[in-house]
Amino acid sequence: MQLLPPRNNGFRMLAYHSVRPVGAISPSPYVIDPEQFARQMTWLAENNYHVVSFSAALEAVRTGSPLPPHTIVLSFDDGCRDNLTYAAPIVRRYGFTPIVFVCPDLFGLPAGKHRGFTTPSPLLTRVEALELIKAGWEIGGHTRRHPQLVRFCTGEELDDEIGGCREAIWNLLGYDAKTFAYPFGQFNAVVKHWVARHGYEAACSTLHGFNTARTDRFELRRLVIRAEDDLWEFRRKVQGAYDWLGYFKRRSLAKKMLWQGYAP
């Protein structure tokens, strides 16, 4: 696929997880070495990418304010402790302000399996999450315990994980989490409805693509950056080489929703 020309009035979102030293081979596709992450951030800065906060990007597309070509939002899922110890000093060099989507019931847990969720790195404590907020990072909801929401059958379960997440973040951090990221990137029409029902203003998927005012704000596109992405592959992702995958995945998802009896 050919790289796409720069697009205006929208933004791309990059999704990270853990950033920490890994040695020769990463223990997980979601654990990126700090040197690799630093090269990516340097490349964005040196190639005139405009890295803005998630709230600023959403406000721009909501109001119709122009966003320049090469606008990027940085996001981190799960709330790994190394977001503070390794990623934060790197983004601070360039004045970048990411958002981290956290599961408040998992604060402070070690690496390993916790029910149906496995984290390759220890998770932030409440105090460490407050340090990120103080450093200018934004906070979003990622459910209370990182379950697969599409497997839930009752509204009570969805209320607990989705609404309970926002409430817990407020109680623990004094922060109003207005945005959400679907665990495992999985969602359907029912899950989307419950996210909106609990007052979130937008939600992030892991569908590839570019976000504009026409993008469903509860299906915002994100590009997952993995350990195997060298700088050449990172550049291809950022420049839109895989946007076509998002189109086909969205069509497949819409068909699945219809088959399940949901409106897409």
Image (spheres, helix red, strand yellow):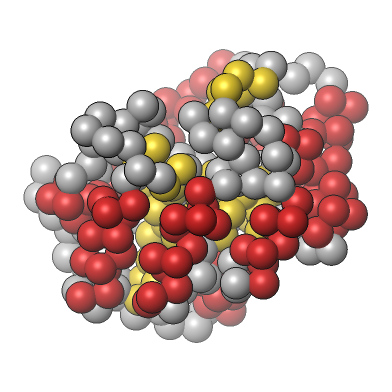
The residue located at (39%, 65%) in the rendering is 90
In the image, residue 198 lies at what x, y percent?
82, 48
Q: Quadrant of residue 246?
A: top left
Q: Residue placed farthest to the left in the image?
A: 2
Task: Say which of 77 and 256 sits in front.
Answer: 77
Task: Say which of 220 and 31 sits in front.
Answer: 31
Count the numbered circles shown: 0
Task: Say which of 57 and 132 sits in front.
Answer: 132
Asked whether residue 151 appears in the rendered view, the answer is no
In the image, residue 191 lies at what x, y percent?
70, 34
Task: Say which of 252 and 129 sits in front.
Answer: 129
Whether residue 216 is situated above or below residue 80 in the rendered picture? below
Q: Residue placed farthest to the bottom in the image?
A: 65
Task: Give left or right: position of 58 versus 19.
Answer: right
Task: Give left or right: position of 86 versus 107.
Answer: left
Task: Give left or right: position of 1 versus 116.
Answer: left
The residue located at (58%, 54%) in the rendering is 100
Quadrant containing the N terminus in the rendered view: top left
Quadrant containing the C terminus in the rendered view: top right
In the image, residue 74 lies at what x, y percent?
45, 60
The residue located at (23%, 60%) in the rendering is 39
The residue located at (57%, 22%) in the rendering is 112
Whether residue 93 is situated above or below residue 167 in the rendered picture? below
Asked whether residue 164 appears in the rendered view, the answer is yes
Q: Quadrant of residue 202?
A: bottom right
